[in-house]
Amino acid sequence: MKKFWKPEYLVSLAGCGLIIYLLFVGPFIGVADNGDFLRMMNTIGLNYYDTAASYTDQFFNFSHSRFAYENLFRGFYPSSQILIVLVPRLIGGLIHGSFFDVRLLGAVYGLLLLVATWLLVKYNARGSYVTGLLLGVAILFVFYDIGYLAYFNSLFGEPVSMVFMLLTFALGLRLTIQEKPTTKGLTLFFIAILFLVTSKIQNAPIGIAFALIFLRFMTLDGERKWRKLALRFSIAIFLVSIVMYVTAPKELKHINLYQTVFFGILNESPDVKGDLQDLGLPERLEVLAGTNYFQTDTVIKQDDPSLVPDFYDRVSHKDVLFFYLKHPGRLIDNMEYAASNSMAIRPYYLGNYEKSENKPAGALSYTYSGWSEFKNKHIPHTLGFLTIFYLVYFAGAVFQYFRSRDVQGRVAGELLMLLGLIGIFSFLVPILGDGRADIGKHLFLFNVCFDMMVVVMFGWVVHKVVGIVRR
């Protein structure tokens, strides 16, 4: 029984209580659909439960706990989310034959979050009970916030990125702590990365960075065949990243390109014609500057056949990258815009309650929202603050890296530096890949990385203070 008083058990038990209370007791809390659900619904065989509901009732204003069953794979959206949703969807057919209760999916995400929490506390307490407890409290305060948990009761892909980001670093740090890391542990690390990288197309390039980390893991003194397995995983995750990006649906690529150019580069541009010329695009497209793909009042319709030779076949994200390299000031302008929207974990324009709760349209739940509200209201939403924050984080990571005298410590330091790099990448990709469209929601993974970095720094300070007190 003594083991249940260990920090990892106490924290996980508290986390389980929070998940049950916030997601399964009282009124249903989820996140309203903004139209993104349909891709996954067509893939795993679901439909809207009330197809006669008005547009405002179906989208944006109210969340939904029930979905109707349809045939599987009426469409296909390449994502590891398919596996996460498909299991509870099939189980749901046995439990609720007339409808799918999305809380079954929320329970799966909750279980994965609890596993990540247990691993993070157990293997990063550094032998200190106080450090373990305080680290656990920080994880509970940050990642069990309703801003994160409400996503669990939805068909958005964001919770896949969140839970597997936490699992990836929990399993990776665990390997650097073990005296003789196991191939089984390395395989679990690879699986977590695989789910993270393939959860969203915008996450695909992350796999290239993890491919390099696997090469560094080869230097650890693991079990027999450790080096060969690490090399194979490095090659595999590199190839998966390339394939994931190359095979992205053509329609999705068109949407992203339109948003990137017309709602990004040309949005509030001081020289629209000049920018079009730099991109190699005809001047007639200047009438689309500042418009997004889903507008219905554009002069030229987004699916107009003439846009294929004049736009979609002429420009790529490589051209966008070169444009920003040629015009760095324009990139900084969009980075400042992104920074002004960077501290909102939740999409404030999507309601949390079902209509049957008789809440105002778009009403949000603020139960256990201390961290998300603190971030949104009190942490500076500026590029300058983010720059200082990252400099402090990397300074601490580099300091610890050079203080480490063993390979395990240095690989752990590199893994934590990778966390910061993924955060930077997740900040830039929405700008380069989707312009200013729904920028706050597209910065979700950036928020996860930022919050993980905050917890890492907090854990480091606690560890140092505990060490001083002991001495």
Image: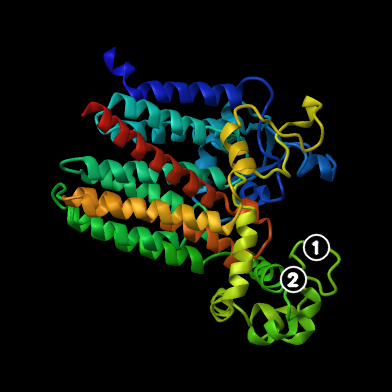
Query: What residue sits right under mark 2 in the picture?
Result: 268
Q: Quadrant of the C terminus?
A: top left
Tell me if I can see residue 151 in this picture.
no
Q: CA distance from mark 2 to mark 1?
A: 17 Å
Which mark, residue 56? none
Secondary structure beneath label 1 = loop
Image quadrant where residue 355 sits? top right
Residue under numbered circle 1 = 295
Q: Which residue ends up furthest to the top in the rendered image?
A: 1
Residue drawn at 19 percent across, 58 percent down = 228
Q: Looking at the image, is 102 positioned above or below residue 298?
A: above
Q: Nearer the viewer, residue 340 or 125?
A: 340
Above or below: residue 130 compared with residue 346:
above
Q: Is residue 323 left or right of residue 415?
A: right
Quarter of the figure that contains the N terminus? top left
Q: Position of residue 445 (x, y in %)?
A: 52, 50
Other-residue count near label 2 (Cα within 10 Å), few / some / many at <14 / 14–19 / ≥20? few
Give the residue drawn at x 82%, y 75%.
300
